[in-house]
Each structure stands twice: as structure tokens, then as C-alpha cells.
Image (tube, rainbow, N blue to C red):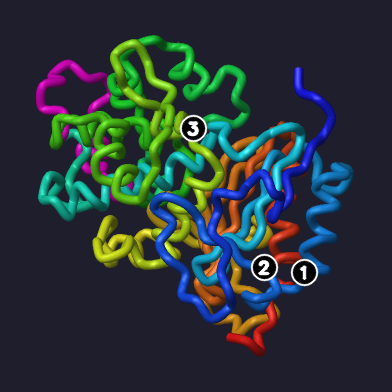
Amino acid sequence: MRRPSVTILLFASLLSFSIHATASQKAPWPTEQWTRATPKSQGLDDQRLSELVGLCQEGRRFPQLHSLLIVRNGYLVLENYFSDYGPEELHTLQSVSKSYTSALIGIAIEQGKIKSVDERVLDFFPHYTDLKNVDERKRAMTLGHLLTMQSGTDYHESPYRGSPHEDLNSRATGWDRFVLNRPMIREPGTAFQYDSGGVILMSSMLNARTGSHADRFAEQYLFEPIGVRRSRWFSNQEGHPHTGGGLHLMPRDMAKFGLLYLRHGRWNDRQIVPESWVIESTRKRVSLAGRGRVVGYGYLWWILTPDPSGAGKEFIYAAMGFRAQYIFVVPEHDMVVVVTGGTTSGVDQRKPIEFLYSHILPSVDTRTE
């Protein structure tokens, strides 16, 4: 049972291992540790951000949050924890895991292990000769359809109770067969339907082509290069990691992933994720209406409206997960925002999007850009 809310503020003395910067310094890559700076030195309004931290700590307007981190110009300018969570604790990412899976697919394509997003899904599984519900629609389904949630498969997760997703999560083995056996309900590429099953299948697709499931592939080609030393995946008894929502990381390492994408997939002097993949993954490939600030979907990334008080030209993109897990990437302001939480309320899960636009974006002094 957790103790009452405790907040660890940005410049607490116990974080003495961190490096502090002056405004004139160029931010070093945080492979081993983040370099810190004051929000003000990076053109952010201290007062507005302090108000937000207070609201998160108080918990009525923005309840059940566990962390809030902001990176600006490569510097960690704000890091707060709530409800007795701390910086060293691995936190569930839920469906934020999907955006990591997208990155792994891009890396595998760059390596030539996967030809392209146009490869047909069934071509990854020639050894499965007894699949159910195979028709022309299923034969036409591609990796690109899975990446954009347009598979056409009868797979849903809301409401969760009784859904195919609950069924899959309850199974100790056979996740790939379960997804591949689902019947088709429409032509692939014709409609958006949120589908974690297709993303979970991607780990088997990686394994088929690289000899490694997503967890080991990520360790070698994504986590190690950017300095992620600790991670945990929920996996089934066959060692198949749950790439739809099973990754656990520290919030600081979530911020590294956001910075990697903000820097077009480059880390220090090395291209980790192909720049072309970052661009293609984070552009609006599917238009979504009636979802508030969320206006589209890329390759396992959500697309949000530009900052209304900024130039208004660059979309924000985000990795988003159940219980209020977020990585927001704001190219216009060279900013990454990480949020973790524990709420199950549908309304409260969307509150980080609210305060991104009500507090964080308005804190930017556009005169300094």
C-alpha cells in the first residue's frame, strides 16, 4: 500500500549526481545521465509550471498521476513524482509500448530483415498451414495495415470484458496463432479500428525475420545505444513479449525515447532509428475526427493539433497508453513531455492532454525561439 503523495522536485539535493547547465551550454546527450537546467533558462514560465505541479500533487483536477517530466532543448527542466513513486521505479507503459514496437519495425526494415511495410502478414508465417478464416482479405493484409490500425480483422478491446483482447491476455501461449485466426470483417486499409493484437503479432514477425523477439531486438538495437539499462516486458510462457502494452521503463528513459524521435532518430553520432522512418511514422496517415486534440494516427503514433499559441504549423505527436501513460513530442518547441499515472477513469486518462495545452504549451516564451 502506498503512502500519501510525495513529490520529488527538480533540484532536490538528493539528485546530486545530475549535471546542471547554464543557458549558453549545448545539451549533451543523456546516454548516462540527464543534464538539468531551470525552466526559465530554457524559455519556460516557472510560475505556470509550478501551478501545474501543484495541481498534479493536489490531485483533484489531475488525479492519480505518478510522474511529470519535461525536456526542453535537450535539458531536463522539470521532474516530479507523485503518490510515492520515484525516479528509479520501472513503470508500466501500457500502449506507449506500441510506439517502441514501431521503432523496432523501422530498424528491422533499415537492416533489410523486413522488406517494407507492404509485405503481406501471412508471408511472415509460411509454417502455419492450418490457419482459420483465411480469405482474400486476410491474404491482402500487410504490415502497413497493422501499423495504422487498419487490419480489417475482427479484433477489438473496448469494452474489454469479453473482448478478443481479454481472451488473448488470458492465454499463456499461442498469441500469434490467436491473432492470425481471427476472422476478417472488412477489407484491410478501409477503416481505423484500434487493434493491439496486430501489434502483439509484430514481435513474432520480428522473430521470424531476425531470430529475436522484440525484447531482445530492442535491447541490442534501441535500448543499449541510448543508455536504457533496465527494462521489463510482460511475456507469455513461450517468451513472446506483449508489444501491445507490456513494456516497463523508468520515466527518464521514456524521455530518452521522446528525445530520440525529436532528434529524427539520431543519438549522438549514430542513427538509431532511420530518419525516414521517424518522418513516416509521425505523419498523419489516418485522419480521426471527434477525438478532441487527437486528429490522426501514424505508424503506432497518435497525431495531435499544433500549439494554438505557436506558429501552428507542426503537429504534436504522442505515444499514449491506458491509465494515463504519455510521451508527447513537440517539434515546434524542441520539447518532450512524459507523464505516467494510475487512473482507470476514461476522463482522467485524457487529463494530460488537457494540461499539455492549458499549462505546458502556454509556458513557452515564443520570443526566445
The reply to whether the C-beta atoms of the residues labelled 2 and 1 are less than 8 Å apart is yes
**Residues at badges 1 and 3 in contact (C-beta under 8 Å)?**
no
Q: Is residue 8 left or right of residue 280?
A: right
Q: Residue at x 33, y 61 (%)?
A: 267
Observer-nearest residue: 208 or 68?
68
Type of the residue with mark 1 = Asp
In this view, the residue farthest toward the bottom is 367
Whether residue 222 appears in this view of the structure is yes
Q: Give how far across and how far down residue 310 sits, in percent.
A: 64, 81
* Residue holding disc 2: 38
Q: Is residue 83 left or right of residue 338?
A: right
Q: Residue at x 74, y 58 (%)?
A: 354
Mark 1: give few (<14), some (14-19) or many (20+) Cα within 10 Å. some
Q: Are marks 2 and 3 in contact (CB under 8 Å)?
A: no
Q: What amino acid is at disc 2?
A: Thr
Image point 73% across, 44% down: which residue?
A: 8
Badge 1 or badge 3: first in the primary sequence: 1
Label 3, secondary structure: give it: strand
Tag in front: 1 or 3 = 1
Q: Which residue is mark 1?
A: 46
Range drawn in magenta: 124-146
Q: Position of residue 25 (x, y in %)?
A: 50, 76
Give the alpha-carbon distance from disc 2 to disc 3, as whole Å: 28 Å
Q: Earlier in the sequence, mark 2 or mark 3?
A: 2
Residue bearing the label numbered 3: 248
| Image quarter of the N terminus | top right
Q: Secondary structure at mark 1?
A: helix
Name the N-terminal-most of marks 2 and 1.
Answer: 2
Where residue 276 sits, quadrant-wise, is: bottom left
Q: CA distance from mark 2 to mark 1?
A: 8 Å
